[in-house]
Image: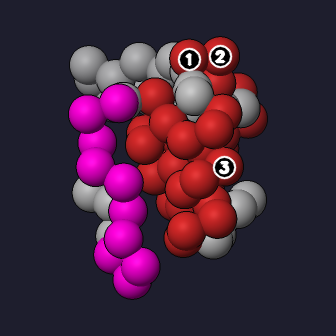
């Protein structure tokens, strides 16, 4: 996640932390150029699902870049 508040919201929605789950802020590990590239291609900035997909793309170099109209798994 890129913001501690995201974890707090998720845990509140789930009424606790599921067994085996652990939160980790990975913002500092994200390649900011790849992050911006994702948002330029796909939009969705500040929507939690899009932010998560963009962050995954920016942190994991082995994730293929999105194409127009595609959804990054």
Q: Residues within 10 Å of mark 1 (few under 14, many from 20)?
A: few
27 within the magenta span: no
Name the N-terminal-most of marks 3 and 2. Answer: 2
Judge whether residue 15 can be spotted in this image: no
Q: Residue at x 36, y 54 (%)?
A: 65
Highlighted range, magenta:
61-70
Q: Residues within 10 Å of mark 3 (few under 14, many from 20)?
A: some
Q: Residue at x 66, y 49 (%)?
A: 36
Residue underneath mark 2: 28
Q: Residue at x 41, y 79 (%)?
A: 68
Q: Residue at x 65, y 16 (%)?
A: 28
Residue underneath mark 1: 29
The quarter of the picture where the C terminus appears is: bottom left
Judge whether residue 64 can be spotted in this image: yes
Q: Which mark is residue 36?
A: 3
Q: Give the percent coordinates (x, y) of residue 7.
A: 60, 33
Tell me how far mark 3 sits from mark 2, CA to CA.
14 Å
**Which of the two marks, 3 or 2, is nearer to us in this view?**
3
Q: Give the percent coordinates (x, y) of residue 8.
A: 66, 34
Tell me how far mark 1 sits from mark 2, CA to CA.
4 Å
């Amino acid at each position: 996640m890129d913001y501690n508040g995201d974890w707090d919201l998720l845990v509140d929605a789930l009424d606790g932390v599921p067994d085996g789950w652990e939160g980790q802020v990975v913002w500092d590990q994200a390649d900011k150029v790849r992050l911006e590239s994702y948002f330029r291609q796909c939009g969705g900035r500040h929507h939690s699902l899009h932010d998560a997909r963009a962050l995954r793309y920016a942190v994991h170099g082995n994730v293929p870049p999105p194409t127009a109209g595609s959804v990054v798994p």
